[in-house]
Amino acid sequence: MSIQFDFSAPQPLSPEQQRAQDIALVMQSAIEQYHKGEIDDARALFEAIIEAVPQHPDANYNLGVIKVQTDLPAEAVPHFEVALGIRPQNGQYWVAYINALFQSDQVAAGWLAVEMAQQQGVNGPALNGLITQLAYPDRKLETTPNASPTDNIKLIVSETSDDTPQPEAAAQPADQQQQQQQPAAPVPLKTTKHRQADKGELHKHNMLVHKGQLAESVAVARKLVARYPKDSECWRALSISLHKNSQFREVIPAARKAIELDPNDVICRLLLSDTLRHTGALAEAETQARELLAIVPEHAEAHRILGVTLIALGKRAEAIASCQRAADLAPRSAAVHSSLGTLYLGIGAMDLAEKALRLSLELEPTNSNARSNLLFCLTHNSTIDKAALFKEHCVFGEIHDVPAAGSRRYPNKRNPDRKLRIGFVSGDFCNHAVAYYFLPIVQHLYRDPSLTLHFYYTFGLQDHMTAQLRECAHVWNAVADMSDAALVKKIRDDNIDIVVDLSGHTAHTRIVALAQKPAPVQASWIGYPGTTGMAAFDYYIADRFVAPIDEFTEQFTEKLALLPSSTAYMPPPNCPPVNGLPALHKGYITYGSFNRLNKLSTEVIALWSTILRAQPTSRMVIGAIGSKLDEETYLEWFRNEGIDTSRLTFCPRTTLPVYMQQHHHVDLCLDTFPYVGSTTTLNALWMGVPTVTMPGTSMPSRCGAGWLEQVGLHDFVARDKDEFVKKSIELTRDLDALSALRIGMRERCLGSVPFHPEKVAGGLSIALRTMWQRWCADETPTPFEATLPADWCPPPAPEAKPAAKATAEAEARAEVKTAA
């Protein structure tokens, strides 16, 4: 059978087909002109297409792109709106449209457009970058994956064939699959002869280290490397001494030199990796740890350091594997079990964390970091009662308090009315929740002429918050590299009258040093929601909403000093506006939670699921997701409660503006327990979203209720689980009331004390003066409440002079010398 050929003439095109073909040819020509740089010709051709087919989506989009690129963004907006009217799910259209709104100073419209785009399923780095830009309209952002959202706004070559959703069309997310760095192979030792220190000189150094005479050991090691610069053992000795003496930044060059001379030096590679981690150079710390494991694959301490580095890098699965391998290799190592416990604590595996930390303390009972982490872990335990929790804190004091530390003679002049030197000690003078609470208060406290403020920063990280806090310090001290003894001496030499610790049992704490009570009065505040358990601290600063004296005295070794508000809230600058209640246009209720994930537990998810089951159409948004593994864990917990996971939306950790804008999709937040939200509750309030909370008997369980009561939202505070469920459902039945509350929330907030940092600063100043006057009168600390007099006014702002800051610091240091 032969093949048949069809020689018949092609069928003529219909008028519609011919028109479509003509338009496609004009479109192609317009694109070609554009790429040749003939922008005017391209514009004319796109306009011709639109004149023939006004609703042509790609022509309108392309013409809009050209108008934005030729500085006519306002004229571009209607073209993008036409395109979106035809294809509302096209992500590339949305990004270009929002960018045009921003470029034409229509910021409010831009926020509405972001919300509409998200409702169409548009997400990704390009949109997040625009959210950040909308939040800071007066600032030119640095080039980052999220800060250059318009780099990929280009012409569309041809009309798409369907309306398939394209949520990521204009966003080119960075490749998240990083190449695994291969560890470097060991380098052979050099055989060149050089002068070496004799064993006696090195032995002298080692004995000084063994005796704890660290300053002397550093001096000896420096002399050794000066005399024997090619001897790797001398550089190793210097690295060890510097590390032991907490001179971490100096360890790095010394350890590098030792490794250069002896690439197989295990100790120096360990020191270098650990020090890089400590100073925040995480990627290099990982590299060094892996290179060490290439030399000694079964080294437990190297696996431990790699594990804690990986968890800081967000590589959870690898971190667990490394720390578990370390525990297998060194089952009697307290440090290994402490690190494993800290890792579990960070991911919310509280039972495993407590088990590992208790094992670490069995092996090394005096490990203060492990014990502080255990205490922090126990505050998340819903089964421990307040008496048992208090007893656990007291154990810390029994071990680390210095007997008779407070009975020493202080040179501070007992004048109740003189200018006071206040020393704030913290590891959180950086982008941290504590800093956000502290900054607005101290900005006003700095103006108080009766106080001189000394800051002691116990961590090495420097960022924009550090810079702002430095401006509020009369004297700034970076003490991260100071030993406990050196820090105590520094505070004493500065003649500090009152030390206020802002860390408690959290990272970078120096409360073991403060156990020596370098100042006559010491207080704990903000950083840790509970007692230090130590006799060295006289007061704990809070407010009557979270720690009423009659209920909480028995939970503190310190005496309670209550302010009008325990802290102040500083709304993020250029925050997104409050939007309308989502349920009014979506037709269903959306609950939300943005708490850190180690506050979540199967018990919390079970209670939330009770609410979701009672409202079958409701949905839930959960933020602050750190990894896919986190998401999978919570999905499994919800599945176990019978919740269809299609009702859940998970939002990854992101920039502050994007996080705040996520509240646009939430009607009501649900709190965690027993460790409730604090900053997240305040952020939600500022975005118009109230939170249902359930306070308990401990301070970590009462923060949310405290903020809600401060702003008069008593109806959102539940007494028990049944009432929590009942309120969470009933409060969403009156959507008009919830909508009115949302719209007026910021005005409501601004009428409360936490949103007036000048009042909190005024209360703190009165509290500090009261503490001081009692010490001058030789009175025993007792609980009290600092209230502002009716005629109280904040101190006036100082004159803005370029040299004022330097002058203030010079005067403050001169004050110290005079007092000494």
Image (cartoon, grey):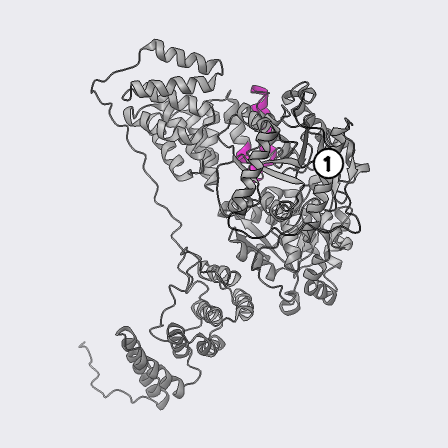
Q: Which residues are the magenta region?
A: 342-367
Q: Between residues 697 and 327, which one lies in front from this camera angle?
A: 697
The residue indicated by pointer 1 is: 417
Question: Is 350 covered by the magenta stretch?
Answer: yes
**Magenta segment, principal secondary structure?**
helix
Q: Can residue 441 be seen in this view?
A: yes
Q: Which residue is drawn at 47% across and 25% down?
A: 328
Give, as a three-letter code, the residue at label 1: Asp
Residue 653: percent from left, percent from top? 52, 50
Above/below status of 794 relative to 522: below
**Is disc 1 placed on a helix, strand or loop?**
loop
Residue 819: percent from left, percent from top? 62, 29
Question: Is 310 covered by the magenta stretch?
Answer: no
Q: Quadrant of the C terminus?
A: top right
Q: Between residues 736 and 88, which one lies in front from this camera angle?
A: 736
Identify the image quadrant of residue 282. Answer: top left
Q: Between residues 481 and 411, which one lies in front from this camera angle?
A: 411
Residue 673: percent from left, percent from top? 68, 43
Residue 752 placement, left or right of 55 = right
